[in-house]
Amino acid sequence: MASKLLMLTIFVFDLIAFGLAIAAERRRSTAKIKQDGEDEHSYCVYDSDIATGFGVGAFLFLMLSQIIIMVASRCFCCGKALRPGGSRACAVLLFIICWVAFFIAEVCLLAGSVRNAYHTKYRSSYLTSDKPLSCETLRKGVFAAGAAFIFFTSILSQFYYVTYAKARGGPMPYGGEAGVGMAAYK
């Protein structure tokens, strides 16, 4: 039987990670081109950088959730073998898909956090023929994609743990003879 406390803990961590990813998407850095006091140069001014912290927080909560699930299920590496059958096959399939969704979510969150923290420091001058100033910002939807994959990872990891627990549960079937063996008495 799957541990309800473990599943609740994983759900809470995934929910926190999802909320942080949505908050990061809503609070992405924006930039405006400003003129200096003498109107000779223009430069980029960025607003709050809190989305980077939200993205890193979501990254860490999702990673903690995945670590807990894999430690609880022994990551298919340690412990006794699972019972053969549909539950084991489903657990293996969900294990692989869960890791793929986790990897995509982590890449989106990490790349979004790094890109959001990057601020250009270029200046443009009206006196020389400089190229027009471009203030680099994070594309819309990177943290939202991370949040979507957090949601998928959460669902997949819950189903993975339930099918793993079902495949692990109970004693292994005995493949020997069903009768009582008799031997000569001496």
Image: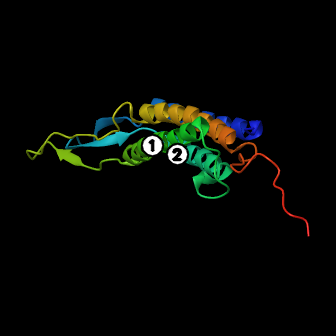
Q: Is residue 19 visible?
A: no
**Could you classify mark 1 by the number of other residues whose Cα lies within 10 Å: few (under 14), some (14-19), or many (20 or more)?**
some
Decide if residue 142 is on the left or right side of residue 20: left
Q: Earlier in the sequence, mark 2 or mark 1?
A: 2
- Residue 16 in the image, given as x and y percentages of width and height: 62, 36
Name the amino acid type tagged 2: Phe
Q: Which label sits on residue 100?
A: 1
Residue tagged 2: 59
Nearest to viewer (mark 2 / mark 1):
1
Q: Is residue 164 visible?
A: yes
Decide if residue 118 is on the left or right side of residue 128: right
Q: Which label sits on residue 146?
A: none
- Residue 161 in the image, given as x and y percentages of width and height: 64, 40
Nearer to me, 4 or 87:
87
Going 47% across and 34% down the picture, which residue do you hit?
Answer: 149
Going 38% across and 40% down the picture, which residue do you hit?
Answer: 46
Question: What color scheme is it?
Answer: rainbow
Q: Quadrant of the C terminus?
A: bottom right
Question: Is label 2 in contact with label 1 (beta carbons under 8 Å)?
Answer: no
Q: Residue furthest right?
A: 186
Q: Quadrant of the N terminus?
A: top right
- Residue 123 in the image, given as x and y percentages of width and height: 23, 48
Name the amino acid type tagged 1: Val
Q: Secondary structure under badge 2?
A: helix
Q: Residue furthest left?
A: 129
Q: Secondary structure under badge 1?
A: helix
In the displayed structure, 80 sits above or below 48; it is: below
Nearer to me, 48 or 61:
61
